[in-house]
Amino acid sequence: MVEKSGFGGLWPTLFEPFRLAGTRIADWLAPASEASSGEEGYRIALELPGVAEEDVELAVDGGVVTVRGEKKASREEKGDTWYFSERQYGAFSRSFRLPADADEAKVAAAIKDGVLTITAPRRAAAAAAKRVTIARG
């Protein structure tokens, strides 16, 4: 329930667009993501709206992909009789363990329209073991 302020209910109305956006500072501690796999490999997508490419770091170590970065965003709205400014800053980090058959050396990433997409191809299947015949002597 939203309490009405001394401004005849205007104050909650000003905040409504920001609340509907669902963006909270805590959301940046671990950005929303999705992971999928296909015949060719694996894909991880993270939502990073408002995060500049130069503020994102990607590392792969020991089969774990780690994405770190910092959000530096601000939004300002003005009207005839009101002014509102909202800023969001904060570091985030998210790690994902790659499946055993992912080729860690070929992990790639691209960012477009606020979505960071990480891909990891599957390693080529190991050749079948060669059967050796034991000579009888």
Image (cartoon, helix red, strand yellow):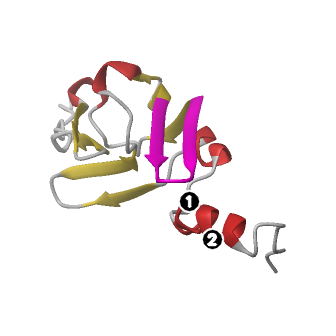
Tell me the residue at 60%/63% (across/down).
14
- Which amino acid type is shown beneath numbered disc 2? Thr
Disc on res. 58: none
Q: What's the distance in space between the residues labelled 2 and 1, CA to CA?
A: 10 Å
Q: Which residue is mark 1?
A: 18
Q: Residue at x 67, y 45 (%)?
A: 26
Residue 90 appears left or right of 111 = right
- Where's residue 58, x and y in %? 38, 24
Quarter the C terminus occupies: top left
In the picture provided, is 58 more to the left or to the right than 105?
Answer: right
Identify which amino acid the numbered label 1 is placed on. Phe
Q: Label 1 neighbourhood size at 10 Å, few (<14), some (14-19), many (20+)?
A: few
Q: Which residues are magenta?
A: 72-90
Please tell me the numbered disc located at residue 13.
Answer: 2
Q: Is residue 77 magenta?
A: yes
What secondary structure characterizes most of the magenta part? strand
